[in-house]
């Protein structure tokens, strides 16, 4: 009697999942913002209730390749022959880590922005007419009768550029559009990355042979010289490629 009650309650509170619904959720799962490792773990969790049986590894591999966010990793996996789930996971994680390291390297080596320096010729100050004092510019009037001396626009109240510094004359109190200085010469100072930066190297496993290679983030294919191929992979059968470089 007790066993029957346990079975009834178990079926009520923990009903057996519908395989078609579980597989539907599995095949709709794409990678979001998580890493490849976390995405693979989530696929394995979803597959645990799908009853794939002997087809489990193939189902996980297919969903991994189709659901990845990075198209570069997808292209690499689609070009592999006899791809297994284990091999697909290793390639995807390795390319993800390499892409992250390359991005961090570029951010670290990014040069400062372009700095601009101005030189100008000073105008001789004009002489005020007799019987009149030079007019002073004001940017605090409630309603300007003409263009504001600080921004060269008409507006009410205090100008928000009254304490700004002009990049033409380097004086405070106005911006360049309200500056009367002319004959400005612009000098640009450029910075470049040193050519002596050491290349990024990594070790790739090709047919269970460790091959040292140099990382090139701008390359669409991986190349190997004939000498290195004969030395390291002389037992591998090479197929003719359809790619044109």
Image (cartoon, grey):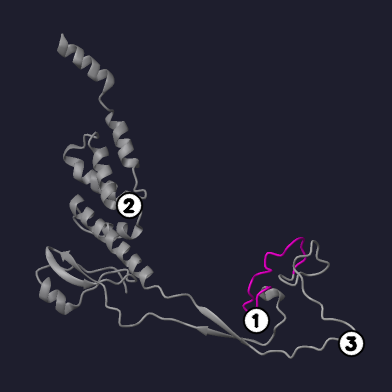
Tell me residue 213's x, y (percent): 21, 72
Q: CA distance from mark 2 to mark 1?
A: 54 Å
Residue 215: mark in rendering = none
Q: Is residue 75 left or right of residue 121?
A: left
Q: Quadrant of the N terminus?
A: top left
Mark 2 or mark 3: name the one nearer the start of the chain: 2
Quarter holding residue 120 = bottom right
The front one of 84 and 70 is 70
Quarter holding residue 200 = bottom left
Mark 3 or mark 1: name the one nearer the start of the chain: 3
Q: Quadrant of the C terminus?
A: bottom left
Q: Secondary structure at mark 1?
A: loop
Q: Main secondary structure of the magenta part?
A: loop
Q: Is residue 219 magenta?
A: no
Q: Which residue lies under the disc numbered 1?
A: 169
Q: CA distance from mark 3 to mark 1?
A: 29 Å
Q: Is residue 172 magenta?
A: yes
At x 32% / y 50%, what residue is drawn? 66
Query: Label 3 near label 2: C-beta < 8 Å?
Result: no
Q: Which residue lies under the disc numbered 3?
A: 130
Considering every residue shown, the one lying at the far right of the view is 131
Crowd band around label 1 with a 10 angstrom C-alpha radius: few (<14), some (14–19), many (20+): many
């Amino acid at each position: 009697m007790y066993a029957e009650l346990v079975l009834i309650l178990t079926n009520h509170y923990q009903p057996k999942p519908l395989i078609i619904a579980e597989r539907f959720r599995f095949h709709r799962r794409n990678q979001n913002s998580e890493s490849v490792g976390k995405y693979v773990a989530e696929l394995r969790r979803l597959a645990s209730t799908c009853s794939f049986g002997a087809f489990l590894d193939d189902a996980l591999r297919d969903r991994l390749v189709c659901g990845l966010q990075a198209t570069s990793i997808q292209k690499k996996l689609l070009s592999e022959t006899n791809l297994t789930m284990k091999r697909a996971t290793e390639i995807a994680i390795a390319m993800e880590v390499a892409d992250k390291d390359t991005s961090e390297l570029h951010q670290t080596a990014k040069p400062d922005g372009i700095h601009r320096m101005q030189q100008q010729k000073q105008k001789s100050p004009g002489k005020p007419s007799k019987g009149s004092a030079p007019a002073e510019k004001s940017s605090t009037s409630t309603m300007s009768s003409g263009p504001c001396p600080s921004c060269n626009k008409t507006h009410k109240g205090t100008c928000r550029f009254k304490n700004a510094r002009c990049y033409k004359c380097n004086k405070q109190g106005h911006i360049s559009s309200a500056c009367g200085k002319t004959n400005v010469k612009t000098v640009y100072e450029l910075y470049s990355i040193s050519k002596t930066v050491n290349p990024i190297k990594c070790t790739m496993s090709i047919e269970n042979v460790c091959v040292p290679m140099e990382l090139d983030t701008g390359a669409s294919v991986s190349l190997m010289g004939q000498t290195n191929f004969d030395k390291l992979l002389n037992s591998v059968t090479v197929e003719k490629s359809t790619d044109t470089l």
